[in-house]
């Protein structure tokens, strides 16, 4: 089964060719235009996808030496995400499917992240606990089976990646700031500044906006040379507070739900400190930790094609899933769980 997959839910344009669950080719372009605005501008993202998608798709397919006629199924992200961006990628995919007379399958972006650590790896033992953190989402999800998910916690305000980006903006770092903070924090002192660990001991939901405000108040007390002299310390202390509260909840969730593996997903899963902490937490509990490669952490079409293959194999590739949905709670995919 050869699948052509497209991802355009936000500011990444990505195409992948996946054969029987194996990624033959994947190409991902991150739109650069948003960095000057300090965040993704939805209209510009949609316009940029219009220009990128056609050449990107042809280039990716040509890498595999295969042609359109060898494709069995076309999959694309249909939600959640920016409406304009989703419409460009999924509209293109739908048109291609119609022209080639092949089925089209709409994919839930977050569901694809949940399974992304399995790409090019053996199957992850279930149930597994996923910490999914990106610029738009932060959640803890217990994956029992395909289409059987329990969201046990999510953010009450900012997403974790958003907190990194906002703190980066306060400090004049370019958008998105996560990777740069990760790099700079490595040389900083994690206990130089005391920042709050939000919602400690209060269940599995997260909150990061208070932490961002605490960083802002700290910066207001300092002049610019103090800030630049202690930049790695500020970032290391911010990161330790953010990840410390995340890890407290993950450890608690492992104890309560007894998953058979711990998994990370989403752009923030590329963070080196988070990866260390998750690995140690899993080791401590005697369960394996699955961390996707950094390319698979961020938005990409390989995970879209991989999930399309899994769904198709399980007989779950239904046409009902193809409507574009900018808002699409993960729980809706799991009627058994949300009804419980
Ligand atoms: O999943 P993703 O590529 O896009 C979505 O938001 O859906 O995630 C992007 C987010 C940004 O907020 C970025 O700052 C953050 O992931 N990020 C990181 C790192 N790499 C990317 N955050 C912390 N450490 C990193 N190494
Ligand atoms: Zn994502």
Image (tube, helix red, strand yellow):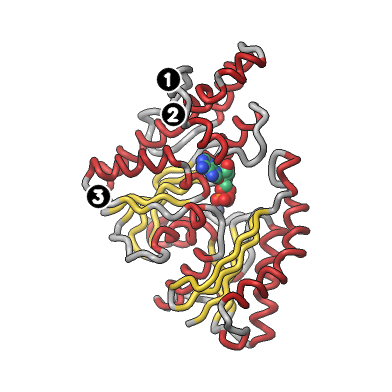
| Residue 321 in view of the camera | no
Q: Position of residue 246 (x, y in %)?
A: 41, 36
The Cα atoms of the two marked residues, 3 and 2, are separated by 23 Å
The residue that mark 3 highlights is: 287
66 or 5, nearer to the observer: 66
Vertical order, 23 against 248 (above or below): below
Mark 3 lies within 8 Å of ligand 1 (Cβ measured): no
Vertical order, 15 against 257 (above or below): below
Residue beneath the point at 61% across and 63% down: 14
**Dot 3 alpha-carbon crowd within 10 angstroms: few under 14, some 14 to 19, many 20 or more:** some
Q: In screen coordinates, is 229 left or right of 53?
A: left
Residue beneath the point at 55% across and 41% down: 179
Q: Position of residue 22 (x, y in %)?
A: 44, 73
The quarter of the picture where the C terminus appears is: bottom left
Residue beneath the point at 40% across and 76% down: 314
The residue that mark 1 highlights is: 191
Q: Which type of secondary structure does the marked residue at label 2 adopt?
A: helix
- Place residue 229 in its image quadrant: top right
Q: Position of residue 36 (x, y in %)?
A: 75, 41
Vertical order, 35 against 14 (above or below): above
The Cα atoms of the two marked residues, 1 and 3, are separated by 29 Å
Q: Nearer the N terminus, badge 3 or badge 2? A: 2
Is the C-beta separation of discs 3 and 2 under 8 Å?
Answer: no
Residue beneath the point at 54% across and 84% down: 72
Q: Nearer the N terminus, badge 2 or badge 1? A: 1
- Place residue 205 in its image quadrant: top left
Q: Which type of secondary structure does the marked residue at label 1 adopt?
A: loop
Q: Position of residue 248 (x, y in %)?
A: 35, 33
Is the C-beta separation of discs 2 and 1 under 8 Å?
Answer: yes
| Residue 313 in view of the camera | yes
């Amino acid at each position: 089964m050869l699948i052509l997959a497209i991802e355009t839910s936000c500011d990444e344009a990505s195409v992948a060719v996946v054969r029987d669950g194996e990624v033959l080719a994947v190409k991902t372009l991150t739109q650069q235009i948003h960095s000057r605005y300090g965040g993704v501008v939805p209209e510009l993202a949609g316009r940029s996808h219009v220009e990128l998608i056609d050449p990107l798709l042809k280039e990716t397919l040509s890498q595999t030496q295969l042609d359109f006629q060898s494709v069995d199924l076309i999959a694309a992200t249909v939600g959640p995400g920016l409406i304009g961006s989703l419409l460009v990628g999924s509209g293109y995919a739908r048109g291609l499917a119609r022209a080639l007379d092949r089925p089209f399958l709409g994919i839930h972006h977050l569901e694809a992240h949940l399974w992304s650590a399995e790409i090019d790896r053996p199957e992850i033992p279930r149930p597994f606990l996923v910490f999914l953190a990106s610029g738009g989402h932060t959640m803890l999800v217990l994956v029992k089976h395909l289409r059987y998910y329990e969201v046990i916690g999510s953010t009450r305000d900012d997403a974790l990646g958003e907190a990194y980006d906002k703190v980066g903006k306060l400090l004049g770092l370019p958008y998105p700031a996560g990777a740069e903070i990760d790099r700079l924090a490595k040389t900083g002192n994690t206990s130089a500044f005391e920042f709050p660990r939000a919602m400690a001991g209060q269940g599995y939901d997260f909150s990061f906006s208070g932490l961002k405000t605490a960083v802002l108040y700290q910066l207001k007390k300092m002049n610019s040379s103090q800030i630049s002299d202690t930049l790695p310390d500020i970032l290391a202390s911010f990161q330790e507070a953010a990840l410390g509260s995340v890890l407290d909840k993950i450890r608690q969730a492992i104890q309560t739900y007894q998953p058979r593996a711990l998994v990370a997903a989403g752009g923030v899963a590329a963070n080196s400190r988070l990866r260390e902490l998750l690995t140690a937490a899993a080791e401590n509990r005697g369960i394996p930790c699955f961390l996707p490669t950094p390319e698979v952490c961020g938005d990409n079409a390989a995970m879209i094609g991989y999930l399309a293959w899994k769904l198709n194999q399980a007989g779950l590739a239904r046409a009902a899933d193809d409507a574009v949905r900018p808002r699409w709670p993960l729980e809706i995919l799991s009627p058994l769980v949300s009804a419980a």
